[in-house]
Image (cartoon, helix red, strand yellow):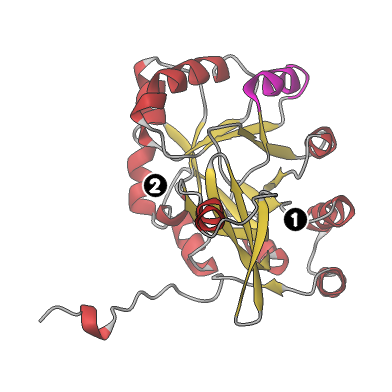
Amino acid sequence: MSKIIVIPNNKNDIEQISSSNFALIGIEGYSVNTFNIKLDEIEKICQNNNNIFLSLNKNILNSELVDLEKILLKISSLNIEGLFYYDVAVVSIVRRLNLKINLIWSAEHLTTNYFTINYWSNYGVDSVFISNEITKNEILEISNNTKSKLIVQLFGYIPMYVSKRHAIKNYLNYFDLNLNSTKYSLYKEEKKYSIFDNQDGTVIYSNFILNGLREYLQLKDKVEYILINGYEINDKKLFDVINMFKDVQESNIDIYEEKLNKMFSNLEKGFLYEESIYKVKKDDKKA
């Protein structure tokens, strides 16, 4: 049976989430797509709570390597479930210093096949956060061909684009417009995309909320954890969703699906049934 990891919207939700599930918290300055907190505050949270995952999932600059080593040393002393990482430097430092940290490969668009997952398993990587761009059947195929623990997002907005560049800030500065927020929206083809631009760069989220509640019934015995992203979902709805995932069965799935459709107007299945196909433009084809 899968356990539930939740990305909270604020610090107040962490205790309630982690009382019976797991909370995923980002480290300020070193994480994207999460609610980020300073490491000193995280230390206090972890003193009385062991249902915490940490995220350190940004590209690391050469100038940040010394600080990264200090951060990993501090993390190794905390009572956490595991650390989501992106940059290979994290694996290198953990191995060199023989740190006791459960590593979770979280490279977003790259975690798509069991060959690479098994490769990193040989280097001590405990788990993998599966890409949102693959289908349910591909997730099942990975599960059947790896011993690594799998984490799959099954609810919430999906990060589509992440960049260290400040897309919104640079645009506003270029046109001499006021920068008065970190949250913006992009409207394209009558669809609204949420954009988050802060000191760490820019993230663009999907215009829809991924709803994999029904698919959870098929995946719950195949993956170790499922993830619910609380980004831009108010507290009441978020905890209602968590409870549905905890209680869902074949006998009540239709009732819960109906409730979700009343709660949210933009539910979709994402890539769970749609393969990603990359097509080369006509002018880009080689002779």
Decide which of tag 2 and tag 1 comes sooner along the chain: 2
Range of residues picked out in magenta: 38-49
Front residue of 165/53: it is 165
Residue 273 at x, y = what percent?
A: 55, 75
Badge 1 is on which residue? 232
Please determine whether, in this image, residue 215 is positioned above or below residue 71.
below
Residue 7 is covered by the magenta coloring: no
Q: Is the magenta region chiefly helix, strand or loop? A: helix
Badge 2 is on which residue? 117
**Nearest to viewer (mark 2 / mark 1):** 1
**Which residue reaches farthest front?**
176
Whether residue 228 sits left or right of residue 31 in the image: it is right
- Label 2, label 1: how far apart the Cα atoms are: 31 Å
Crowding around mark 1 (Cα neighbors within 10 Å: few <14, some 14 to 19, many 20+) is: few
The answer to whether one can see residue 184 in this image is yes
Residue 132 at x, y = what percent?
A: 53, 60
Secondary structure type for disc 2: helix
